[in-house]
Image (cartoon, grey):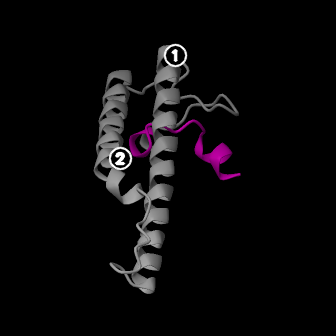
Amino acid sequence: MTVDLQVARRRLVERKSELESLSELAEGARKPVELDQQAVGRLSRMDAMQQQAMAQATERARQRDLLRIEMAERRIADESYGYCEECDGEIPEGRLKIDPMAERCVNCAGG
């Protein structure tokens, strides 16, 4: 395996830190929308609710990525990092540079 595990660990830690920071920053956008008709018109409330839904969906995606990071860290620990979970072939280093959480080779991920 030609993958530098130290570099992979560093990328995972950096991505995890980035995701956690983004999650903290966007916490307010995920809070319930106030339905005070005096303060906000109907269209503004609908817009706020749509923005809230988008913020919640983005947070779910961040949480999935955090889970994928945790799984990649486990693969590093058990020395299976960089190998496809389906075919056991090596995942190309270029793919791991783009997505250090990749668990499948290009062939298995595509089909």
Whole-number angstrom distance, CA of label 2 to CA of label 1 = 30 Å
Q: Residue furthest front?
A: 38
Specify the amino acid type for callout 2. Answer: Ser
The location of residue 47, given as percent across then percent down, is: 43, 77
When the figure is inspected, residue 82 is found, relative to residue 57, above or below; the finding is above
Q: Secondary structure at mark 2?
A: helix
- Residue marked by disc 2: 23
Q: In the figure, residue 91 lies in which quadrant?
A: top right
Sequence-first disc among 2 and 1: 2
Q: Is residue 89 above or below residue 28?
A: above
Kind of residue at badge 1? Glu
35 and 69: which one is in front?
A: 35
Per the rendered image, the range of residues in magenta is 96-111
Residue at image location 57% in from the left, 35% down from the top: 103
Q: Which residue is mark 1?
A: 79
Q: Is residue 6 left or right of residue 86?
A: left
Q: Residue at x 41, y 56 (%)?
A: 30
Which one is closest to the eye, mark 2 or mark 1?
2
Q: Position of residue 14 (x, y in %)?
A: 29, 36
Judging depth in this view, the residue of 78 and 37 nearest the camera is 37
| Near-viewer residue (23 or 3) | 23
> Is 99 inside the magenta-drawn segment?
yes
Location of residue 18 (image quadrant): top left
| Residue drawn at 33 percent across, 30 percent down | 13
Q: Position of residue 64 (x, y in %)?
A: 52, 43
Residue 110 included in the magenta stretch of the image: yes
Say whether residue 90 is left or right of residue 111: left
How would you rate the neighbour count of disc 1 (Cα within 10 Å): few for under 14, some for 14-19, many for 20 or more?
few
Q: Classify residue 83 as left or right of residue 9.
A: right
Identity of the residue drawn at 51% across and 25% down: 81
